Amino acid sequence: MNVSRRPRLIILSTGGTIAMTAQAASGGAAPEGAALRLGAAALVAALPQLQDVADIFARDVLAKPSASLTLPDLAEIAKAAAEAATSADGVLITHGTDTLEETAFALSVLVQVDVPIVLTAAMRRPDQPGADGAANLLAAARVAVSGSARKKGVLVVIDDEIHAGPLIRKTHSFRTHAFSSLPFGPIGYVAEDRVRFALSPAVAPPLLTFGAGAPIVPILEAGPGFERESLKALGAGAIEGLVLSLPGAGHVAAAAAADLGLLAERIPVVFASRTGAGETLRASYGYAGGEIDLIARGLIPAQSLDARKARIALQILLSGGARQPDVRAMFQSF
Ligand code: ASP
């Protein structure tokens, strides 16, 4: 990079609370509450300090609450980010917090470039007391154009912390400190205008290619109360893949194991640990419904991915026409 010129930062907006303001009481049919009103240009205009960080170029990609994002939406965000990365020193994506982790994960498997791709969000609307969007946007902009953020994969900057995109999760429903990368932690932080990295992600996720469509892949969480009838009620005929969120290292009720094995003969059935940390085991528990039994019946361990990330990975793989052996092989990279 030519150090004498100002960095170029492309900001892509996709929606979320950071782009919402309160809606005045309406007489019409629209629900009261917050509504999406601010595009990328408005977010930039509201924060003049961004101009001290870089030359800013703003673009609207989507305007959605993040719970409404679809798999093709994630692919569209990835495409926009990859395109932006060809002409910028950093790419910053504003997003809703609710499903930020799915998008961060999807980007980390779909866009692998040296240019920093940074996501940020807000827990409070710009019109609320203690709004956090502007501070997050400014910190994220600093990270996105920082030379030290290059080649670190997709990052999330929120609450002055820098997180590795594949690790972060939303772990609180309303407070401003709502994200964590447990059992690890943030890999850096932003102090005033200084971007500090303490750690570098040691492994890059595999590179996947989005094909087309939005394969039907529900997540089913098991535990006491999950019986084989729950599986039948799911209407297994229509689904193209299934992700199970299982207790412990990947264990299900013995009574459900055979049905899951039958299902795994037709469609990929991936099982993840529901604990939120660690990974699925392969060789520790051999009872019916234990991970050894499930793997022998054709189920695929998600390894370090939780169910949400496993679903995104499986949907992307199926969107490109992957078959069971491809899915099994790819999940070994997680
Ligand atoms: N509902 C919002 C969303 O789009 C919440 C947020 O951004 O914090 O995810």
Image (cartoon, helix red, strand yellow):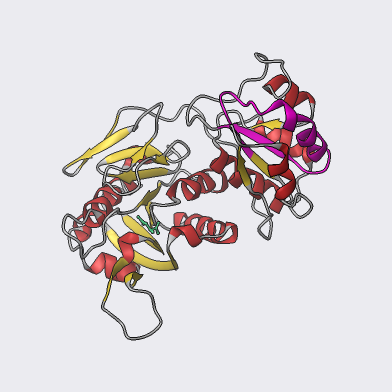
Which segment did they paint magenta? Answer: 244-273
Residue 174, percent from left and from top: 30, 49
- The vertical placement of 1 against 20, above or below, is above
Residue 78 makes an appearance in the image: yes
The residue located at (18%, 63%) in the rendering is 48
Quarter, ligand 1: bottom left
Q: Give the camera-side residue of 202 and 313.
A: 313
Tell me if residue 250 is in the magenta stretch. Answer: yes
> x, y percentage for residue 130?
17, 54
> Residue 208: x and y, percent?
63, 45
Residue 195 can be seen, yes or no: no
**Up-down: is 208 above or below 35?**
above
In screen coordinates, is 79 left or right of 290? left
**Foreground pick, 3 / 316:** 316
Find out whether residue 40 is within the magenta segment: no
Question: In percent of the image, x 54 and y 43: which residue is there?
Answer: 308
What is the x, y in percent for residue 199?
A: 35, 27
Toward which corner of the image does residue 27 lie, by quadrant? bottom left
